[in-house]
Amino acid sequence: MGINCHCKRKPCCCSNNKIRNVSNPTNNPMFNPVINNTVVGGQNTSFSTAFGNFFRSPENIFLESNQAMEWTNTGASSGGVFLSSPTQIQVTQAGFYYVEYLVSVFMGTERPDAAFVGIFINNTEVPNRQTRGLIFNGEADRFECTNVTLGSIFFIPENALVELRNIGPQLQTCGDNGVASSVSLIKLSS
């Protein structure tokens, strides 16, 4: 029987040249990790996947203070995560989600020296400032497109509306050759 090693090094760097079961990396018949009383990899789980990716085309826009980002495109999306309006993402399944965002911001002498953004759920900012992202321009002569990015895990209730908002002074997005902003939500548990 041949070994399907992914390693391109000679000699092979795979542990003892044995292929391990990805769902049971120790090859232990008793291996059954449990998260929130749900057996991971088991046959009888109640976990339902949900995820969504939304982004804005590279056109430059201005966001006023407390204004939500408008999404122009939807990437992969499933399990009740969808755009309910151009600025609001509806999440139908309650659970803990990993949420990551990126906003490309123009920094220069005519713009404010800092940009702040954050996640709001049902018009309330996620507590403890855990989703606040900041970029600071400490150089008076710097003109560039730079990114505010952050990832966090927090609970999103059933049928919630999620927004990414500018929580600082007016900012200008950029990204002439790519995405001006994006947000991804991935459900981790119920």
Image: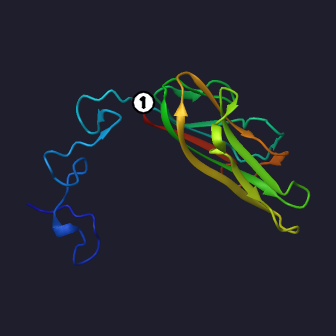
Give the camera-side residue of 56 and 118.
Answer: 118
* Secondary element type, mark 1: loop
Q: Residue at x 50, y 37 (%)?
A: 97
Q: Amino acid at mark 1?
A: Ser
Give the left or right position of residue 44, taking residue 144 as reference. left
The answer to whether one can see residue 49 in this image is yes
Q: Residues within 10 Å of mark 1 (few under 14, many from 20)?
A: some
Give the camera-side residue of 46 and 83.
Answer: 46
Q: Quadrant of the C terminus?
A: top left
Q: Residue 59, position in %: x, y?
A: 76, 46
Q: Quadrant of the N terminus?
A: bottom left
Q: Residue at x 48, y 25 (%)?
A: 93
Q: Residue furthest right?
A: 110
The answer to whether one can see residue 175 in this image is no
Give the camera-side residue of 128 and 86.
Answer: 128
The quadrant in which residue 72 appears is top right
Q: Residue furthest front?
A: 128
Q: Which residue is mark 1?
A: 190
Residue 19 position (above or below residue 67): below
Q: Residue at x 25, y 47 (%)?
A: 23
Q: Residue 111, position in %: x, y?
A: 88, 54
Q: Residue at x 31, y 32 (%)?
A: 37
Residue 62 position (above or below residue 112): above
The quadrant in which residue 118 appears is top right
